[in-house]
Image (spheres, rainbow, N blue to C red):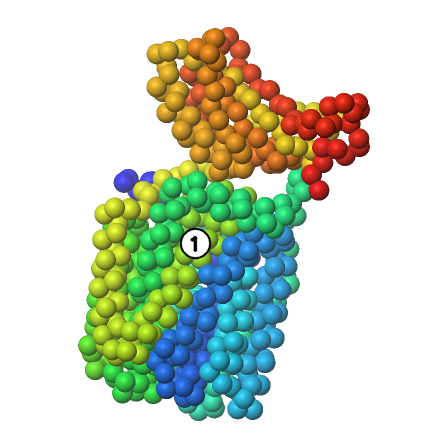
Amino acid sequence: MDAGSAAKATGRGALAPLANPTFRSFWLATLASSFGGLIQAVGAAWTMTSISGSADMVALVQASTTLPIMLFSLVSGAIADTFNRRRVMLAAQFGMLAVSVALAFAAYWDLLTPWLLLGFTFLIGCGVALNNPSWQASIGEIVPREDLPAAVALNSVGFNLSRSVGPAIGGAIVAAAGAAAAFAVNALSYLAIIAALLRWRTVPGSGRLPPESLGAAMGAGLRYVAMSPHLARVLLRAFLFGLSTIAVLALLPLVARNLVAGGALTYGLLLGAFGLGAVGGAFAAARLRAWLSSEALVRLAFAAFAVCAAVAGVSTSAPLTAAALALGGASWVLALSLFNVTVQLSTPRWVVGRSLSLYQTAVFGGMALGSWLWGLVAEGHGSAVALLAAAAAMLAGGLVGLAVPLPSRTELDLAPLDRWREPPLPPDLRPRSGPVAIEIEYRIREADLPAFLDVMIDRQRIRRRDGARHWTLLRDLEDAELWTESYQTATWVEYVRHNLRTTMADAEIGERLRALHAGTELPRVRRRIVRQIRWLHSEPPPPGAYDLH
């Protein structure tokens, strides 16, 4: 890779996004919010060790925060792609503020029980689930595409800068003033990002088409990811990474208390070491991406985290455990930022919120399941055995790459193709009339038939990915060179939406088909509306007869 290619692959520089005032204000606000969130996490985890002696209940504190992200991220992603993202984030932040205030009061009046504490942390996790897809999707609107990897890495840097000192301060706050004070600090931390959101003025959308319904938007997101093999690989590897590596964070309160014989402050310092390692990993990410392939980098992260878990499981020395956690933190941010960037660069803007939400569902679903699983192992066999078993699982997760490697880093142009022009709508139809049947006729010579069928494999996948139904390929029995591609959309507006989703990268398929077409004119397109037999004797059809409501 030459210098120019490396620069393009890694962006204009690790700190380039901070030159953007909007990104900079959000980054600083998110830094403050992350700081408060980590103080809250220390307070919740340590409170659970005080009110419950069960190892699996301690691990469930981590699970209760990550489980909502697994359960609700797809809905949140559809909301992020359908509604105003600024308003969505404001709703999420105000909701988390209210829950945090209630948690602080419950802790102050000594009302917390293990299940009530889990309920509060679950509600905060719901706010995170609602906020994250909108925020992650907004990054691509705030910074240029070439700065996106650096912006994602800087988000990790900000969070892990907070992690490097926040948990230690959180441990000190809990030790000195109790968990209620830690929860109150978290409540105050939401004010910074709320202020940044109130100042942000987004560019309104074009409003060319009405928004999809929430159910249709969720279905479109699932369909897009299912029909995108590269994204499916990223989601699988992210799930395995979250499932295995969360053992270290979920069991860290027990490591601090039982294996290194410390208290709340020790737990905070160990989390701080993890955060410092993550900061170093974030700054090293650009250089490592230039040196290593995506698959090599992820395998390295799996292996390094396995070392971290194994050392944490056998060490009785706080400094040695801290050093291992720094290695784990670097591995954590390298893998997760790579997964995030790969999803964003592989997804067009119309579905990026839903794709990111499914990525978060995968990784946080793995974390939630892993927190519960490793908590059960620790409850039955001890924290050391659980961490060593998790280390073995991490090594296995790296080896999965031999069969399911991550896609290579390629620069796909996912901007809208913007060549298609909507034909005039017949006077007796409305935008929601349907179903609409489309047929495209090609004339293919016998010698070009293998190439044509190969292209049609990709054509079918892209059509279905972008919303087409009942796709078929037909060959005329009387004219062997005549082939017809046929598909349907539910309504006319869905037909328009389907065509507007075509990207510059998809254009290659159309160009290859036109090159194979042997006709003297372009392939002929026929558009028809599906009509019910009971209407055939009613002329003209009753008003709105074709509408789907």
Residue at 63% from the left image edge and 52% from the top image edge: 83
Is 349 drawn above or below residue 535 in the view shown? below
Residue at 61% from the left image edge and 35% from the top image edge: 490
Q: Nearer the viewer, residue 146 or 85?
A: 85
Q: Secondary structure at mark 1?
A: helix
Q: Looking at the figure, which quarter contains the C terminus? A: top right
Q: Give coordinates of residue 252: x percent, y percent.
A: 32, 77
Is 473 drawn above or below residue 193 in the view shown? above
Write down the residue under mark 1.
Answer: 359
Q: Give coordinates of residue 269: x percent, y percent.
A: 34, 80
Q: Nearer the viewer, residue 183 or 13?
A: 183
Is 356 drawn above or below residue 3 in the view shown? below
Q: Residue 266, located in which quarter of the rendered image? A: bottom left
- Amino acid type at circle 1 is Tyr
Q: Nearer the viewer, residue 107 or 508?
A: 107
Q: Give coordinates of residue 23: x percent, y percent.
A: 52, 57
Q: Residues within 10 Å of mark 1 (few under 14, many from 20)?
A: many
Residue at 25% from the left image edge and 84% from the top image edge: 260
Judged left or right of residue 37, residue 13 is left
Q: Looking at the figure, which quarter contains the N terminus? A: top left
Q: How many marks?
A: 1
Residue at 32% from the left image edge and 58% from the top image edge: 240
Q: Give coordinates of residue 375: x percent, y percent.
A: 33, 74
Judged left or right of residue 430, residue 512 is left
